[in-house]
Amino acid sequence: MNLAVFLSGRGSNFEAILEAIDKGTLAASVCLVVTHNPSALGARTALSRGIPVVLLQRESFPDGGSFATAMIAALQRHSVDWIVLAGYMKMVPPAVVKAFPGQIVNIHPALLPKFGGKGMFGHHVHQAVLDAGETVTGVTIHFVDEIYDHGLVIAQETVPVLPGDTAATLGARVLEMEHLIYPRILAKIAGEYHSRQ
Ligand code: GRF
């Protein structure tokens, strides 16, 4: 199963996915990384492993339609089967969602539908969880549709909020869980994919 990983920054989930592939626990390969950020660390990781990176920035295209067409063309050129969002801070164009029906997943560092949507990224998510006085947060893996943080939930895992937590300590605990469950869920998806082939 050929994966395209979409990312905007650090790429630690991308690294966890690569590690699972290397260990043989995830029967897939990352054939493409898509980013809008030329200095994304994750893009550097990809290049160091010989994984092609395409830089696709909406502002380089005259309109949304031609941007989406270029994205679909890149995905098809690399024979992508599934799209994995791993810290991708942009909306996936609706035409791309249509071109890959039920084949785009995202990871969110909270228990959706709580703490999702506009502005809910990075430390803002964990600060909102703390401000709300939650005692439990977690990780959500969901399908991507045309609405931000909205698609059908595939899996959720809880993470405790501990006394004295800051957004940073809580975020680090949640991230550890992300690295565990994203490769695991992708392995399930890959298993089902291969059994259908
Ligand atoms: C993760 O917390 C993920 O849940 C969210 O963005 C962050 C990306 O981190 N969507 P990284 O780039 O994978 O390190």
Image (spheres, rainbow, N blue to C red):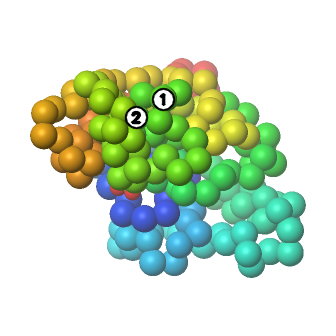
Q: Which circle, 1 or 2, is nearer the viewer?
A: 1
- Residue farthest to the left, as pictured: 164
Question: In percent of the image, x 58 and y 47: which residue is there?
Answer: 118
Q: Mark 1 CB in 8 Å range of ligand 1?
A: no
Image position, residue 3 (x, y; %): 53, 47
Query: In the rendered image, which quarter contains the C terminus?
Result: top right
Q: Amino acid at mark 1?
A: Lys
Question: In percent of the image, x 62 and y 49: which residue is there?
Answer: 80
Q: Is residue 18 above or below residue 47?
A: above
Q: Which residue is mark 1?
A: 114
Who is closer to the viewer here, 124 or 17?
Answer: 124
Q: Residues within 10 Å of mark 1 (few under 14, many from 20)?
A: few
Q: Secondary structure at mark 1?
A: loop
Who is closer to the viewer here, 84 or 74?
Answer: 84
Question: In percent of the image, x 21 and y 47: which residue is there?
Answer: 166
Q: Amino acid at mark 2?
A: Ala
Q: State how many labels appear.
A: 2
For residue 178, say whether it is visible.
no
Q: Are marks 1 and 2 in contact (CB under 8 Å)?
A: yes
Who is closer to the viewer here, 192 or 94?
Answer: 94
For residue 28, say whether it is visible.
yes
Residue 34 relative to residue 131: left or right:
right
Q: Which residue is mark 2?
A: 110
Question: In percent of the image, x 81 and y 48: which residue is there?
Answer: 95
Image position, residue 53 (x, y; %): 53, 69
Q: Is residue 177 above or below residue 136?
A: below
